[in-house]
Amino acid sequence: MNGVVEQLQASAAAAEIRRMKSLRPLVQCITNDVVQEVTANVLLACGMSPAMVPGLEECAEFARGAADALLCNVGTPNRENVQAMKLAAAAAADAGKPWTLDPVGAGGTAWRDKAIEELIALRPTVIRGNGSEILAAAGFEHRYKGVDSLDSSASALEAAQALAARSGSVVCVTGETDYVTDGRRTVSVSGGCAMVTLVVGTGCALSAMAAGFAAGASDPLASTAACCLLAKRAAERAGQTARAPGSFHNAYLDALYLLSPEEAAGLMSA
Ligand SMILES: Nc1ncnc2c1ncn2[C@@H]1O[C@H](COP(=O)(O)OP(=O)(O)O)[C@@H](O)[C@H]1O
Ligand SMILES: Cc1ncsc1CCOP(=O)(O)O
Ligand SMILES: [Mg+2]
């Protein structure tokens, strides 16, 4: 497949980022044990409200009611939290709220792959993963190293397009270049800074951001591409000053906070 790969127009990207910031979406996160804090901090820095609401007893009510969007992330799955993700995802979809699936570690164990397959069947608005995860979730040959990717995003583009066509979700495969596709249109976002991969949770947090960007969006492909663009520009800015992962982490949060929609979209120099 592959076909023509477009780029999001700067004016459209700025409009998506402005829209997200004026909504300040409340993003319900059912995520893994490793990335709770970085996810909340990333959402706050870019202008969203995080709420970690993973409990089986209340997750569906929250998804249906207070939340503007939902993240389901299978990084540290167990029977109970996968069940909570299914209940919350079904409630969100029923209430017309967008939700994002992060298929962390797809392709590693049969049990996790079955959980991911069952979540995909609930039609996430967006599926966001790294190259190996998207290849695995699409049923393509992939290489596996836990939550890291051994496959480039470019090598997973065809799998992303196939997964989007089969699931009805927008699929975002990230890496040196991010690709966002609905199976017909594909948008790429390049740049960023490779040091972002040395800060745990930046991919997981990006999936949470994509959920918030999809809240109220008329075109989830455009909102997801704008989300990737903001993250790439923030990583670039962080990389201008930070020389190692600890300071990069702080500089990345600061850049997510400081970049205006126009700067992130390239309409104004940052
Ligand atoms: N080689 C790279 N160069 C620049 N940015 C990258 C690179 N690899 C990943 N990124 C960025 O890191 C963030 C997380 O993506 P990724 O590392 O693919 O996800 P995950 O953390 O789930 O493995 C994204 O913003 C992506 O664009
Ligand atoms: C290290 C680790 N182990 C289970 S989940 C997780 C975090 C993965 O974060 P990311 O996908 O953003 O790199
Ligand atoms: Mg990940």
Image (spheres, rainbow, N blue to C red):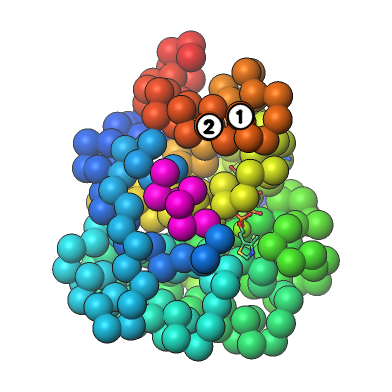
Position of residue 251 relative to residue 116, above or below, is: above
Query: Marks 1 and 2: in contact by CB < 8 Å?
Result: yes
Whole-percent x and y of residue 212? Answer: 35, 51
Q: CA distance from mark 2 to mark 1?
A: 5 Å
> For the residue with label 2, is its CB less than 8 Å from the closest atom of ligand 1?
no
Viewer-proximal residue, 12 or 202? 202
User: Taking 235 as reference, is 99 above or below it?
Assistant: below
* Point 60% across, 86% down: residue: 114
Q: Residue at x 62, y 18 (%)?
A: 241
For disc 1, the marked residue is: 247
User: Is residue 254 rendered to the left or right of residue 64?
Assistant: right
Dominant secondary structure (helix, strand or loop) of the stretch shown in magenta: helix
The tally of labels here is 2
**Which element type, helix, strand or loop, lies under badge 1?**
helix
Q: Residue 135: x, y in percent?
A: 71, 66
Which residue in the structure is indicated by mark 2? 250
Question: Can you see residue 55?
Answer: yes
At label 1, the amino acid type is Ser
Q: Give neighbour class at mark 2: few <14, some 14-19, many 20+ (Cα, 10 Å).
A: few
- Residue 37 is inside the magenta segment: yes
Depth check, front residue: 227 or 183 = 227
Judge left or right: residue 61 versus residue 261: left
Dividing the image into four quarters, tell me where ligand 1 lies.
top right
Q: Is residue 105 above or below residue 187?
A: below
| Observer-nearest of 22 and 140 | 22
Q: Quadrant of residue 178?
A: top right
Which region is colored magenta?
35-41
Horizontally, is 186 left or right of 26 in the view? right
User: Is residue 166 visible to the viewer in this orientation of the structure?
Assistant: no
Q: Residue 120 location in percent, x, y?
A: 50, 76
Mark 1 residue CB less than 8 A from any atom of ligand 1: no
Side of 4 where 49 appears, left or right: left
